[in-house]
Every structure is written in C-alpha cells, then in structure tokens.
Amino acid sequence: MSDEADKIAERKMQFLFALRSKGVTDARVLTAMERIDRGPFIRGYFAERAYEDMPLPIACGQTISQPSVVGLMTQALKVTNRDTVLEVGTGSGYQAAILSQLARRVYTVDRHKRLVREAHEVFRSLNLTNVTTLTADGSFGLPDQAPFDRIIVTAAAEDPPGPLLAQLKIGGIMVLPVGQSDAVQRLIRVTRNESGFDYDELRPVRFVPLVEGLGRDV
Ligand code: SAH
C-alpha cells in the first residue's frame, strides 16, 4: 500500500474505534458510518479535522455534530430499510447521509437555505438518491409527507414539538435533544404506541437551539 492509502486506512480504523469506545456498537450503524466519509460535509478551515470525534463549525453559525453522537442517535432510532425518516436540522447533511444508508427514504429540512443547498450538492455528488432536502421550519414537520416511521431532531427544543409527535406513526420512534438551549440538554427517545407516547431518557447532550421561522439567508 502507498503511504497515502496507509494513512487513510489508519484514520478510518481510529474513527471506528472512537465510535465503538463511546458505545456505538450496532453493526449496521457502524457499516453506514464506515461507508460515508465525513470529509465532504465539512468545508474550509476545519476540513482537516473531519475524522476527529468532535463537533465542528459549519456555515450559518451552525455545527456538524460529533460523530459518536450521530452514531448513538442513529442507533437509538432503530431504523429499518422499510422506514421513511424525517430529519429536522440538515446542517452539513452528514446525519442524513448516514440515515440514507439505513432507511428507505430520508426527508431532511433546515431553516437555512444555504445549508440545504450545500448538503443537496454533497448528496448528489455521493449519488444518495433516497434523500430529499427542503428549506422549512422543521418544528412543523412535513405535513404533506407525514406520517413518518422515524423522526430525528438535531437541534434542541424545550419540549418535543407537537406537530412532530402528531406526524409519528403508531409504533414510530423519535429521537431528540430537549432542554434549555444554553444548558446541557437531555437526549430522549419517544415511542408512539396505540394510546400515547413512551419516553426514554438516553444521555446528556449539547445541541444548537431549534429556532422558529426561516433563516435570513433565504
Ligand atoms: N444534523 C446536522 C447538524 C445539525 S445543527 C449535521 O449532521 O450536520 C442543527 C441544525 O438545525 C442547524 O443547521 C439549524 O439551522 C437547524 N435548525 C434550527 N432550528 C430549525 C428549525 N426550526 N427548522 C429546521 N431547521 C432548524
């Protein structure tokens, strides 16, 4: 192997090792994260740090989540290849790309048009044809495409938004951070049953806030 190929293989091994050591153990999730390179989702100065287990800044003052958090949330969502998934908070598009490997179809929305456009370009370059991108205030969900088997929110609200609960199928699962935006939040899993919702608390996390309305760059 060339030095460069050695370096890439080594980097990938370390990336996967960090995921496992932080509790990402689901083989399907690990395979998806092995296949989708985080590099193309980070532009500019921070691109060289793409393989570290850290959140990094992206455009519009937002952040791409830490890979281990992406892995843990994806694992908690228990996605199957028959599922239609809604992601609120496209950001860089990395989480949606991971989901695209596991789900039948992924809808991902962000309030910033620029982020949606850039993520869409990356999906196209990677030929991820089962991801649909939209610019919208995701706290209202996507009534036209609802209901969803799975919903993932990657920005923190004080409580699970009502329209998202309403757009979850019976038997469906939603994973989201809840709590005050400037404090540590709790990652929770909501499962819809015949008569209501079950809540599991997963772990403390820190996300940017879920903000009302569209970004000014629209
Ligand atoms: N999942 C992303 C990281 C998301 S950062 C990734 O893999 O890179 C959170 C994102 O939520 C930001 O891009 C922010 O613009 C978006 N966001 C915040 N409030 C929103 C809302 N009401 N509707 C849609 N997107 C929202």
Image (cartoon, rainbow, N blue to C red):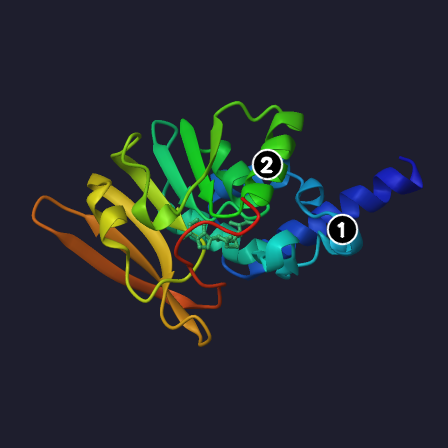
Please say whether residue 103 is visible from this viewpoint.
no
Q: Residue at x 55, y 39 (%)?
A: 116
Q: Nearer the viewer, residue 56 or 190?
A: 56
Q: Quadrant of residue 178?
A: bottom left
Instruction: Examine the rendered structure and indicate whether residue 22 appears above or below residue 47.
Output: below
Left or right of 199 on screen, residue 128 = right
- Badge 2: how crowded within 10 Å, few (<14), some, or many (20+)? some
**Residue placed under numbered mark 2 in the picture:** 117
Q: Residue at x 69, y 48 (%)?
A: 42
- Near mark 1 (Cα within 10 A), the count class, few <14, some 14-19 or many ≥20, is some
Q: Assign the N terminus to one quadrant of the image.
A: top right
Residue 67 coordinates in the image, percent (x, y): 58, 54
Horizontal and vertical percent for residue 177? Answer: 39, 61
Nearer to me, 20 or 41: 41
Q: Secondary structure at mark 2?
A: helix
Q: In the image, is the residue at mark 1 within 8 Å of ligand 1 by its beta carbon?
A: no
Foreground mark, 1 or 2?
2
Q: Is residue 6 above or below residue 24?
A: above
Residue 183 point in image, percent of width and height: 44, 77
Residue 14 appears in the figure: yes
Count every numbered label the image shows and give the total.
Answer: 2
Please name the amino acid that badge 2 sits on: Arg
Quickly name the residue at label 1: 47
At mark 1, the secondary structure is helix
Going by the numbered disc 1, the residue's amino acid type is Ala
Considering only vertical position in the picture, is 92 above or below 198? Answer: above
Could you tell me if the residues under marks 1 and 2 are in contact, i.e. CB atoms within 8 Å? Answer: no
Position of 114 with respect to 200 (left or right) is: right
- Residue beneath the point at 89% across and 41% down: 4
